[in-house]
Image (cartoon, rainbow, N blue to C red):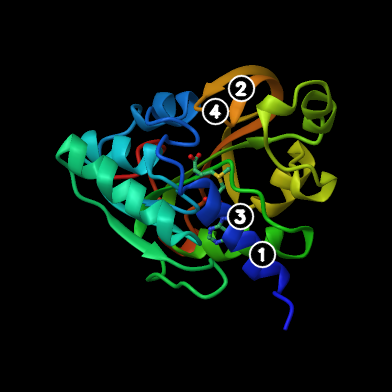
Amino acid sequence: MSKSRDEVYKEKWDHRYSETNYAYGKAPNLFFKEWLLHYEPGSILMPADGEGRNGVFAAEMGWDVTCFDLSEKGKRKALQLAGERGVTLKYDVGDLEELSYEQGAFDVIALIYAHFSAEKKSWYHERLSQFLKPGGIFILEAFSKKHLNYVKANPDVGGAMDFDMLYSKDEIRVDFENYKPLLLTEQEVDLNEGKYHLGQSSVIRFVGKKEIPNHIQLRSSTTLNNPR
Ligand SMILES: C[S@@+](CC[C@H](N)C(=O)[O-])C[C@H]1O[C@@H](n2cnc3c(N)ncnc32)[C@H](O)[C@@H]1O
């Protein structure tokens, strides 16, 4: 019996994470690091965290970290890295389609280079959003639609080759319409992340604050930019 598309995709990640080296390095993504440091530690969900470079960094900064990913091998490497750094993580293995967390459980959700199929992308964003507290912060970095030109010129920069899996600012505006954008840019970056993100690319960067429903809106003019 032939394998389903999902099985083949999961095997691809298990295969990549079977290498001794860390595919995207052990250091956190720079954009994620910069933004996380703006906030007091609380609870954070790291979807599609792979080998855990970002989740482990958050734990080192004192966050209560929950990661998940399709890849069992990714989990092993993440726990190994956490051990090296003397921190702990909760790490679930599974597809976002099946995993579930308590509604409003997290202060921050960070989605770093997670590229989902066109049919599922918006639904996944909506699902993740349910797990974020009102007033919580969503951080996202992913390849933009312009990335295709960059990867053709330099395959070492890696990343999704399917136009529909890549991101645009308009898609973010639609999928995160109930967020106040603190930052939304499409920009060229020079990636130096392990063996698989090497070179110039174009990325979407988004940081948004989930709106507080009207019935629990603050009466004063106080602005809350901190998720805690
Ligand atoms: C490019 S890697 C990025 C890993 C990590 N976020 C990082 O920046 O190092 C993409 C990851 O997304 C995971 N992934 C893709 N679709 C997923 C899904 N539906 N549910 C859970 N994980 C998924 C893959 O297993 C893979 O580890």
- Residue 8 is marked as 1
Residue at 33% from the left image edge and 27% from the top image edge: 37
Q: CA distance from mark 2 to mark 4?
A: 7 Å
Tag 2's secondary structure?
A: strand
How many residues crowd around disc 1 within 10 Å: few (fewer than 14), some, or many (20 or more)? few
Nearer to us in this view, 130 or 29:
29
Q: CA distance from mark 3 to mark 1?
A: 6 Å
Residue at 69% from the left image edge and 53% from the top image edge: 175
Tag 1's secondary structure?
A: helix
Select label 1 or label 2 by which is in front: 1
Query: What residue would you read off at disc 4?
Result: 195
Three-letter residue code for mark 4: Lys
In this rendering, the answer to whether 137 lies above or below 99 is above
Nearer to us in this view, 167 or 113:
113
- Residue 198 is marked as 2
Image quadrant where residue 141 sits: top right
Tag 3's secondary structure?
A: helix
Q: Is residue 92 left or right of residue 125?
A: left
> Can you give x and y, in whole percent of width and height, for residue 201 in the image?
71, 23
